Image (spheres, helix red, strand yellow):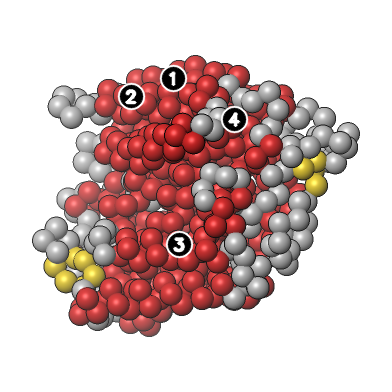
Amino acid sequence: MYAPVLQETGLSRQLGLRSLTMAVVTGTIGSGWLFAPFYCAKLAGPGSLIAWLIGGAIAFAIALVYAELGSLVSSSGALAQIPLLTHGRTSGFIGGWCVWIAYVSLPTIEVLAIFQYLASSFPWLTLDGGQGQILSPCGQGLAVLLLVILAWINLSGVGILARWIDGLTLWKLVVPLLVSLTFMITGAHWGNLSVSLPGEGGLDGGILTAVSTGGVLFSLMGFRTAMDLAGETKRPQRDVPLAMALGLGICLGIYLVLQLAFLVAVAPDQIMAGWGHLSLTAHGGPLIAIALGGGLLWVANLLLLDAVVSPSATAMAYMGVSGRVSWMMGRCGLLPNVFERLNRKAVPWVALCSSLVIGVAMLFGGPSWQKLVSFLSATLVLALAMGPVSLMALRHQLPGVERPFRLIGAPVWCRVAFVFASWSTIWCGRAAVEGASAAIIIPALLYLSVLWGRGQVMEIRNGLWWLAYVIGLLILAEVVTPRTGTPLPMVAQLTLVGVFALVIFPFAVNSRLARPSPEAQLEFRGGESCL
């Protein structure tokens, strides 16, 4: 029986189960808790509670797949390593690139959320950009300073990062529950739960849209943080699966309580025309508007403080993991090897500084939180769709390797998770799928042209399924939600996308390498090695 070996990478293994679970929580409860309840309520009304349950089911299905992968591939930045391990360079670059795009953007989104909330009290932080509020020059300067501070904390070492995460995450657990309890006690408009969207209310009426564009998936996919820090974990084979399960369960419970509190705290006169006409922008953030409307000044002040703390902690965590993803891509030859360099605190400083530079550059593009959620959700779910494929590929490639966590019924479960990921991508909307497809295909073609120019092996055949999958989803997005005409009924959409996913899945698994890629930098006990 073979067992995975923790390969020495130079990274410092200091994190335990508690810190890893806290990292999952802080990666999951960020700006999403400040905005998602409002957008979900507008899209689905009381059905937003069902949207969170659906999103939770999807997240748990995908997380179980990654629990086995995380117990087997215990490296920091593993999400960038796994596609290369099972399907070679082309798949490795596409999968790693998808993850990196999402991660490197997240700190900027969290910082934007901070200043969007603070602008309600400090209007000089933003200005009118014609199609919404954008950061003013002063706001941009302070946002850059905040990103630099977060990068400095990360560069100080994983032990320092863990202490910051532990402390800030305890705050992030207490404040949403305190605010939710206060809203339910002082508001208590339980009749709001019977107010539906006019003429709607079913799955076609916004519940599935809330799962994607409402921020549900965006908020719940933080479980992957455990895998990104696995290489700095003391007992990754045990702690990574446990941290994903514990962290995701805690966060889903908090989001359900928060959504319920938001629904019953809204004044009934605000939804007389239906939830779709709800507007809570007069005082900045939607939760602050409810607090001030109910005379809860202390809650409004607490929310303003948390609008800095929660997104900052999430931004800090994702700045660190984005650096580790690009570090792993450099280590595996998918990016220049300069990304491998570590500082004296055993932190990948070049990779982390590149994330900082790109995050700062994004600040000057003027995007808003809600405009980026759908695109990033589509990109990230596409990246996570690789997990079920890689798990089944590794079952064939390394049948004798000991798995500390083994998913029961993996052949069925992986297909279910792959279908869920495909549905979730389509639910993000045609524009998001178009943007994600362009962000994947164009860089992939550039990467392949570089390999071709150098005369290096490209392993295109093993990665063709990726291109077929992305292009197929792009075509399906155009079919189910055409630019002109009526979208297909939801049952027809689910059936069409589900059948497509089930057809692609065996093709993807069978496209695997004969043996795991030697470039993936992974070793196993028992004489079987990827090196």
Residue type, label 3: Ser
Q: Quadrant of the C terminus?
A: top right
For discs 2 and 3, the disc positioned in front in the rendered view = 3
Of 201 and 453, which appears nearest the observer?
453
**Residue, disc 3:** 354
Circle 1/circle 2 CB separation < 8 Å: yes
Distance of label 1 from label 2 (alpha carbons)? 9 Å
Distance of label 2 from label 3 (alpha carbons)? 35 Å
Left or right relative to 33: residue 350 = right
> Helix, strand, or loop for circle 2?
helix
**Residue, disc 4:** 87
| Label at residue 500 | 1
Q: Position of residue 203 (x, y in %)?
A: 35, 34
Q: Residue at x 21, y 59 (%)?
A: 279
Distance of label 3 from label 1 (alpha carbons)? 37 Å
Of 197 and 107, which appears nearest the observer?
107
Q: Residue at x 52, y 60 (%)?
A: 351
Q: Position of residue 473 (x, y in %)?
A: 37, 27
First of labels 3, 1 by sequence position: 3
Residue type, label 4: His
Residue type, label 1: Phe
The part of the image, by quadrant, that contains residue 360 is bottom left
- Outermost residue to the front: 454
Distance of label 4 from label 3 (alpha carbons)? 27 Å
Q: Residue at x 29, y 54 (%)?
A: 370
Left or right relative to 309: residue 171 = right
> Helix, strand, or loop for circle 1?
helix
Residue 7 at least partly seen? yes
Residue 260 at least partly seen? no
First of labels 2, 4 by sequence position: 4
**Residue, disc 2:** 476
